[in-house]
Amino acid sequence: MKLWSIVVTAGCLFPISVLPAWQNPAQMRQPESAGDANEARGMLASAVQKNPGSAAALRSYAEFLEQYGQPEARAVYAQLLAQLRRAGGAAEAAEIAHRLVILDLLAGDGEALTRDRESYRAITGKALPFSSSEPREAWPTVPIPGPMRSFARMAAIAPEAAPEDVLPALARNVVTNGYQASRSNETLEQTEYLKLLHRYLAQAHELEKLAGAQYAIQVPNCDSPNAGDLLRILGFRMRGGCGSEVVLETVNAGRAFLTADSGFPVNRLEEALRTNRPFSYDFHPTLVPVMFGPAYWTAGSKEPDFIEALISDPSLCRLYLGLSNLEPATAAAMHDAGTLTHLRVYAHVLDFFGGQFELRDGKAVVPGGARSAAAWGELVGVSPDRGVEFFGKLLAKDDGWLASLFDSLARINTPVRDYLTDPVRMKRFYAAVRGKVTSPGPARPVFRSNSDMLLLTTRLELDASGKPHVPGNLEVWKGLFTNNPQARYDGKLTRLAATWKEPDDLLEALFALCRKTVENQPLKIFMALTDIDRGRATPLGAATVERLARSWHTYGSQFAVFSEAPQLSDKSINQFLDTAEALTRLHEPALRADAGGTFQALVSLWQILVRQQTIADRNADEAFAGVAAGFADVHSARELFDAGHRGFQSLLNAAAKPADSTAGPQERMAGLLTGAAESDDVETRQEMEEEMLRILDAQHLVSLDTLFQLSDLLESGQRPDKAASAQMAKLAGRIAAAPLARAPLTVVERNAMGFGFWSGKHLDAERKLNLRLAIEKAAGDPARLANLPEVLAPLLRDSLLGLSYAYYAPPGAQVLFTNPVFVRSHDFIGGEGQTNLWKATEPYGSGWPSNGGGRLVGSLSSLPYALAEAEENFLVPAQTQALIWGDLVPQMMLSAKIPRWWNVTPVQMHWVGLNLRYGRELLAEAALDESAREAAMVELGRLAAPARTAQLRALIERGQVKEAVDQVTPAELFWLSRALEPARAGDRSSVRAQIERLSREASSQVSLAAISRAFGAPKPTLATSYRPELLNVRTFPTLMGYSSRILAESWESNNLYWVALADELSLRPAQLNVRIPQWTRELVEHIFASHLEDWPALLRSLRAVGDDVREHARAASADQKAALQDMPTGRPQ
Amino acid sequence: MTLSRRGFLAAAAGGTLLRAQEPQGPVFRVKVDMVVHSFQVTDSKNHYINGLKPADFRIFEDGIAQKISTFAEGANTPVAINADGTTTPLLNAKGAVPGMDRPDAFVGTNVFVLFDTSNFMYRGFVYAEDAIADFVRGLDHADSVAVYTFSRNLSRAASLTREHGDAIEGLRNAVAGDDTALYNALLLTLRDAAKVPGRKVVIVFSNGPDNASMIAPDDVRAVAEDEGIPIYVISTSEVNKDPISSGVFRRIAQRTGGKAYWARTWQRQVEAFDDIREDMSNSYTIAYYPAANPNEGFRKITVEIVSDVGKKYRIHSRPGYRPSRSF
């Protein structure tokens, strides 16, 4: 046994210091602990080079590479295995052969896998068989004429879609986009999308005929008769005779449009005709599998073509979609048990709520398990033991209400599920959800309408007593239901509320309101207040809860501030509300807008500084209360300027790490916002700060330094002497020099054509401001001078606002760099009669050329999201047809922008990387070991729908681990590792050994809370907070009222994946602040989704960007090596 | 198919660092790169005047005389102006013009075609493709061309290339559909064009209405003006049909030294493209490094023709630019 091995196995039999450096693993890995994995790698590699015969050196190096996800690990392990086999170390050789098999499975390297499995068998005499060698069950296929690429373009399907995913995606697009209400009657008529798809199929059939039996469109030369036929089908003709003058031009616009839109290579054809060369185009049909075979779907149909028959029948499409969502065995059983006609009637319920249906041994798997099975049987009318029949009845029950409850409960795996599936309780809540009139059911609209129930079951909190957490107390909620002048929720519920005695009574009412199509205000209030209480050491007092509940209607969008900062006392929250109410009462709209804007800008800065821990938790409440109290008595612009000035100064004072005290206020705040003044990554910090300063400059905002210096001079209370006058003139000159673009339209133009033009009073007032003149006029009167800061109040608002805009600026920030008055245009009030002061921030006025571009309206409560929304149309999709995914993209952008990684340690990064790698390893192990597979499947089943879990199981059983891993999200890999790793003490995986070591040696850094805060994503809708966190919830479907926004918030994979990637590339944690926004932007630009729930498209894009980053990093590293080798001395100089 | 995307998305919618030395904060400085200025000279009947030499021109910025570094006419080989007033073909004079790393980039024009493929253009989509393809085929071999398409987002259908066939290939690969964010797309096109050395033009082919841009036309126009990129607009609408868009197109074209055309029919579109091509081949391009000028705002550029005859001529160009700022 090698010396190093002795050290490892015997737990330092010899003092490490006596070992040569290359044999001292702790010493060699010291740089790693200091965050320099590259240095450690170099030392380990060097040890291998210096000691080619050392198995210990090889092992140490291989394990290091494996722990950092380096593909070279396999080669080093293979070298080690060869060496061990030569040396006769059978036990260790068996272990390494097993490890190689795991890595081969993950790499999808069949050849190496065969070789290494054989090695293992040769060493141990035991095989490593897969449990299934059965080929995947293949459904009969149907042809789609022509290349898939063309069909995918016309059908709006991602070109990377697997053949088995094509028909479900097509069916979904037909259901959601294929039909619209007729203008003339109540029937449905085809949309332009579907009409064009039909026309394309017709054209493709013509081309297929022309292509003949060889499925190749051949045009031997320009004079060939085929040329004419082809051009006729394509809708083009030749201009000019055959030869160099040939140009193809449109003759039949309808056909030519299909030709162009489907991507037929017209240009190549034109080139062939011009040069009189043969043109050949492969026109083989694409074969796609049809679930249960085409005959099942087209029985009785007069349309012979399956695709045409499918897309012509929306209910058939919905059933196809519904059945394709089911776990395959369940789908097959339902297919066998019922007729197409019967299933078709309930296709909508199956589509939305069938995804969680699962049969096990013929019995239905129900939420709550055995304890709740009887209750489910009573509710459905059939025992879950009669699996298929149970699901058949469930589908048919009350137009989908019971199925929707089943779906909501099946999606959760927390103690809340146990609570809600208590038989008595479940029946009670079902009765509430169902109501008396069941139609229309929750599956009737295009998007799920009962989104509230899904949110309630997912986000409900239980107290230590095991009962639902009721913010405040029950009396508050009784009062809200019975005596609420702002809204009456439901007559019956109002009457019943007086009799409520326990939390379940309130919960029942909340379930009952889930069936309403109108906004479910009580549930939103309940969830928002639950979210505020969630992180607090002491829950909010009843009086505060009552006040918040009753003011939700007006100030609800501000609650995210309270949720994010559990340090806030009841008193401070009440102070905020007092101030907000006082500001709302200000009569003069311009003053109200400036006061509200300045106050919110300071709160926004406070929020950032607290989130970044620049303001320490212990100071957060006092700083907040100070800012809020300062604005409570503002009645004039003069008072407003003072409140703003004081509030700003109090934030600077509250910062834990004082910014450079020699710098001016503006630079100090910019420095604090940039964060981590102590960061040793000066380059990254400088880059971040410069970006902020560039944005502030592009916005032509007056420096806070100038404003405060001028106000100090004006307020001196004395007649200014010559020097003071000169200084005031100079400062006023600086303010005047900030160029403000002219209004886009003159008054005459506005009246003539600026329909809907808003006056932009704030900007107009600033354009008219002549500060120098005002100072000159007041120069002789100190009292008048002292009052002049009132004219600076609007400018102060803009400058403070600008800091938040710059901080949250999404990557690219085209709007902020191009529209110099974007910040100044923020509209806190809105149009005539509107009050947007406390509403959520929204982009407004896009696509309105006469209005000077878009701007943001409302409060600052959702500024990060609104800025990302404003920027999303500037993203450039990587693929011609892909478009940026409306609601999902802003959330992805802010998830990359809000978290900052200054306080993250290399250990935390490595921890995430190790867990993602170990999650992969567990899936590979599952291919070889049945008990490991069962454990992995149970854990995956908590996050993945039954259909996907079954698919993963089938792949793993066949040894197709790489394919399986490609379908598992990084978040799922992380949680899989965290769920199983602690119980796998016997696992000799070096990755696991590192995880165990870190959890022992750096427990506070790698605690779930610390990792969640460091690498989570903000969830403003799902958790009423911009605080980054990991919630470990299933990816949500598209929900009515939220579209893909909640899906995006439940998608926690991006940052985890990026961090693991950064760990693999040995980046410094601070670099995440720059890299993650860039990578996320690329991710978004590479998404090609087929529909609004196509999260696998996100996963593909995430991996594609990651692979691209790795490739570039390796290329850069190879260039660096080559450069070093080219140096005469062979050493860096 | 792409029109479905409309429904899909509608449903979803819903330099050098100079650190601050003064306590007031960072010091912003004006950073002046080489100014490339293109213009046409016409007589009173609007006929192009060709054959003028570098010595025939004087150029001023805010009235301050400037020293011309390079000169080109149409697609002819550009020349570097030596200290004694003589000229040297730019391609042979590498290093003669300080800071000019790629003199070859000054040969020909870099043409960026921005093609509106939004729902508004649905009906005329294929004819528009034909017209643009004809235009690209007719470009001088020295010219480079990029084809960008846009609806709600920009798509770089063909990157800047001298292989005109590749550009047409990209054009023919365009996909129709979705909302129209014309000014957003124009801004991104200008940003791309600004990174390319040499002379460049942007040609917008659209029917006008914009329903998705966050950026105002005048902000985009300011970028084009500052970067010295003329914008030509071919509107497939009628001038009176959409007065707001027509006014905007006219203003953008005039202020950047381009032109606006209203060409509803394919024939008119072809004529508009012919006119643009003629404009390009009859343009003069002068490059200079601005002399010291304290003005950090808008700088007015004046081109004068020295000879008496020249005083009767008209010069069509952008009025000026704003120097970029760095800190």
Image: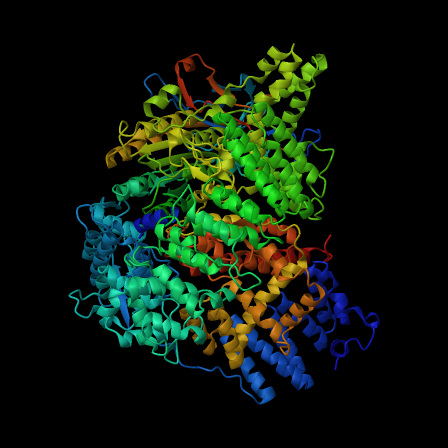
Foreground residue among A283 and A808:
A808
Q: How many marks?
A: 0
Q: Nearer the viewer, residue A200 or A709?
A: A709
- Rendering coords of residue A275 (x, y %): 30, 51
Q: Inspect this view and state whether residue B175 appears.
A: no
Measuring from the top left, give residue A303's x and y in whole percent. 17, 64
Hey, which quadrant is residue A352 in on the image?
bottom left
A1005 relative position to A427: left or right: right
Q: Is residue B316 above or below residue B307?
A: below
- Quadrant where the image shows the N terminus of chain A: bottom right
Q: Furthest residue to the top?
A: A780
**What residue appears at the point 66 percent right and 52 percent down from the top-left corner?**
A903
Compared across the picture, whether A563 is left or right of B203 comes to: right
User: Which residue is situated farthest in the left direction here?
Assistant: A302
User: Does A435 sit above or below residue A82?
Assistant: above
Q: Could you tell me residue A859's position as x and y percent? A: 50, 37
Task: Judge whether residue A106 can be spotted in this image.
Answer: yes
Colour convention of the picture: rainbow
In the current view of this chain or complex, which residue is farthest to the bottom? A125
Q: Nearer the viewer, residue B133 or A1103?
A: A1103
Please say if A256 is above or below A588.
below
Q: Is residue A1030 left or right of residue A743?
A: right
Question: Which x, y percent locates residue A750?
Answer: 37, 23
